[in-house]
Image (cartoon, rainbow, N blue to C red):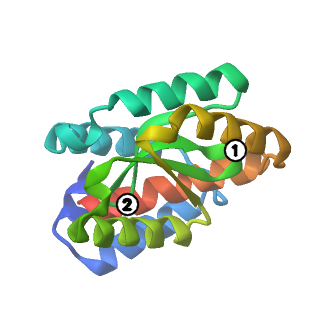
Amino acid sequence: LRCLSLLKSGSTSIKQNVRKFSELSGGIADPLLEDTYKKVCEILNVRHKPETSKTLPEKIFKSEFKRYTRADIFSSIWVGAHCIDLFIPRVRIAAEINGDIHDREFKMRKDEHKETCLGQLNITPYNVNNDDVAKEALKLASFTKERKHIGSVNLKRLWRNIYIQTIASNL
């Protein structure tokens, strides 16, 4: 926690040291890093309550997706400074359920920035319109079944990178 308070001060050298410390585990996330990520997410979820509240189309999409596959799907996952609607880590896909607000200029710019952030982690954004959630859930479930799992070591590295990027972006 001392390290986190130092990170909050914004010192680049300290952020670099935290990244080096987390690399000592061979690229695998350790429990301290995971616990810190979860605490940061709790704070972000309170700060950004409207953004993290699940909409009906998001609930339908997740429910339909789970009907067709056993793949893990997580809601409201923070990646960097962005809240991802639904995340399927085993295939590196972030599903974003988009309503009419996504047609507005400010939201388009925010979505572009989110997609850039996801791209840095090799996570593919999958955009779905509210009206198409049931159909798209089936498509994505089929795609998930066909696509090769990234493997347990790569999955742990992906989570570790998400933890580090999120902690560093929000403190």
Identify the element where label 2 is drawn.
Answer: loop
Looking at the image, residue 9 sits to the left or right of residue 64; the answer is left
**Residue 129 in picture, x, y percent from top left:** 45, 47
Task: Between residue 13 and residue 68, name the one nearer to us.
Answer: 68
Which circle marks residue 7 in the picture? none
The reply to whether residue 32 is visible in this rendering is: no
Residue ID for mark 1: 90
Give the CA separation, mark 1 to mark 2: 19 Å
* Residue extending furthest toward the bottom: 13
Provide residue 79's location: percent of width, then percent of height.
Answer: 42, 55
Q: Nearer the viewer, residue 36 or 161?
A: 161
Q: The disc labelled 2 sits on which kind of residue?
A: Gly
Query: Depth check: 39 or 94 in front?
Result: 94
**Residue visible at 54% across and 45% down?**
30
Residue ranking furthest to the front: 131
Check disc 1: other Cα within 10 Å, few if <14, some if 14-19, many if 20+: some
Where residue 130 sits, quadrant-wise, is top left
- In this view, 103 is above or below 73: below
Query: Front-most of 12 and 40?
Result: 40
Which residue bears the numbered disc 2? 80
